[in-house]
Image (cartoon, grey):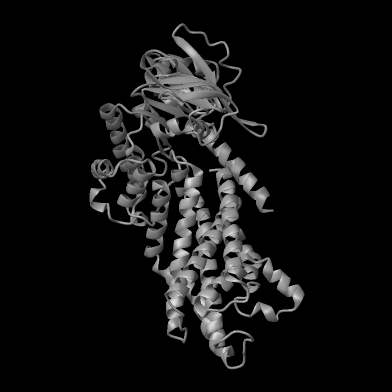
Amino acid sequence: MDIIYTIWLRNMKRYLRSKSRIIGSLGMPLFFLVILGFGLNSVVAIPNVSGNYVEFLVPGIVSMSVLFTSIFSGIQIIWDKQFGFLKETLVAPVSRTEIMLGQTFGGATTAIIQGTIILVLSLFIGLSVSGFWGLLIAFGFMALIGIGFTSVGIAIASKMEDMNGFQLIMSFFIFPIFGLSGAMFPIDSLPPAFRALTMFDPLTYGVEGIRYGLNGVSQIHPLVCFGVLLAFSVVMIGIGAFLFRKLKS
Amino acid sequence: MKTVVVEHLTKKFGSFVAVDDISFDIPEGEIFGLLGPNGAGKTTTISMLATMLRPDAGTATIDGHDIIKDEDGVRKSIGIVFQDQSLDEELTAWENMDFHGRLYRIPKKVRLERTAELLDLVGLEERKDDIVKTFSGGMRRRLEIARGLLHRPKVLFLDEPTLGLDPQTRNYLWEYIEKLSREMKITVIITTHYMDEADRLCGRIAIVDKGQIVALDTPENLKKRIGGDVITIKSPDYSQKIADLNESWIENIEQYDGFFSVALHDAEEHVSELIELLINRKVKITSVSVHKPTLEDVFLYYTGRTIRDEESGVKERMRMTGKRMRH
């Protein structure tokens, strides 16, 4: 536990110190929220969902923020590899699994903080929270998305030599996961073939879960969301730990 | 007592044998040098001893721990300063130390005491709360050494510790390393391709070339083997004309590309005689130098090349590979 905490602590210190990263990674979600939210609010009506489009969109953008931050936190291991710091941890008398778990929880925590900032900012543009328990549910789902996708990032970083492939991963992996997740549109109104595709996207269950917490309604039952996302996170921790253990220093 | 025992250690990368069946041992408290050109297998050897690379054959023990069977035991008893920097630049000097202390599970009280003590020892006490990004190369090196000592290792590995540092900082680090081995009885394994560094610091030196140890002794003994003095003569056309030189005061003649060296006692007395002999044999002489043997001569004697030749060869090869990869 102490080692996991040590790695987590380092992640926190680095995160809180890099003001530009905090502000920089808020840019895109806020842009989406404001432009799409206000731009489409008056022309879009969501069937079977109460409230307006902005309220519908907020959980999606919170998920997006958590997704981006967590994958990026995992991939940061590549920087540690390039700047040599990874050697320092790998040659210490600690297990690789502990290092990987510390990194995962560190990444998930930063992701939750980023998601929370978006959530708080959303209060100013019309989000009304349904209560304490709803918030707690939302945070639970943010944590699961964070843990699952930081593990994905670590798994990717364990296989990558440098940051050259990052653009590729951004375009063909992270954006599709976001786009297919139903963060911006209700999955019920999709054509069947397209809808099936969104069901394979783990983020869909995160978005729906957070939506249940914040809006009080969702198109997938929250327990199903919880089950699927929990399974996804556990499997990804397993894969991430396995690949990280095989990483050559 | 032997702190480090290495037996028939071998590592291959594909068909290239990086470390070829080397064996040696080091008593407690000795500064042991691995001297050789880049690519000779020094870093590979250290990586295997530090459990970062698995040997293909042979084994080693460090402070009684087997590097294959007891990785954690080895890791607890060693400290490493890598060839490339391995600090977290976003953290302060103190935070880097603290992170290391936590990783090695040093209790908080001891951790705080030792961190303060070591930062003071390497002269970084005043900068302890500054972010490492703002440190110079020498300061980073000193911080890395302090960090490597935090968990009181039995053996400290220093992989090219003074590479790229200015002469003043190098001197400072040398004094510091000597002090460590003297006062804390730490066994130090240092790799270097600087002859003067090895000569100055090491109790014994292993000269490594192409993955093998070609000579292992104290710097004094290594130099003694060459003879009392060395006269190096540059000449474009000596080859046939000196083959049968057999004056009684000549101990050894080594021939190289474009020059040859004569090992002998009392060079001052015999240098004019030697020149006379060569002129009589119509050897053209470009330059003559007389000096006490250095490790450079020792390296030349055992490998037939100067360490600088070897370096440029490696660089040339790297450039070629680089070009091939780009196209």
How many numbered marks does the figure carry? 0
Tell me: A90 left or right of A12. right
Residue B69: percent from the left, percent from the top?
A: 51, 27
Image quadrant assignment for residue B76: top left
**Residue drawn 66% across and 77% down?**
A187
Whether residue B166 is visible here, answered yes or no, is no
Front in this rendered view, residue B112 or B239: B112
Whether residue A5 is visible here, answered yes or no, is yes
**Residue drawn 61% across and 93% down?**
A43
**Residue drawn 50% across and 44% down?**
A96
Residue B27: percent from the left, percent from the top?
A: 38, 20
Front in this rendered view, residue A109 or B30: A109
Front in this rendered view, residue A226 or A180: A226
B40 to B110, vertically: above or below: above
Residue closest to the far top: B248
B273 to B106, vertically: above or below: above
Image quadrant assignment for residue B183: top left
Front in this rendered view, residue B180 or B34: B180
Tell me: B65 left or right of B44. left
Residue B242: percent from the left, percent from the top?
A: 56, 16
Residue A241: percent from the left, percent from the top?
A: 55, 48
Residue closest to the far bottom: A42
Tell me: A150 left or right of B221. right
B9 to B85, vertically: above or below: above
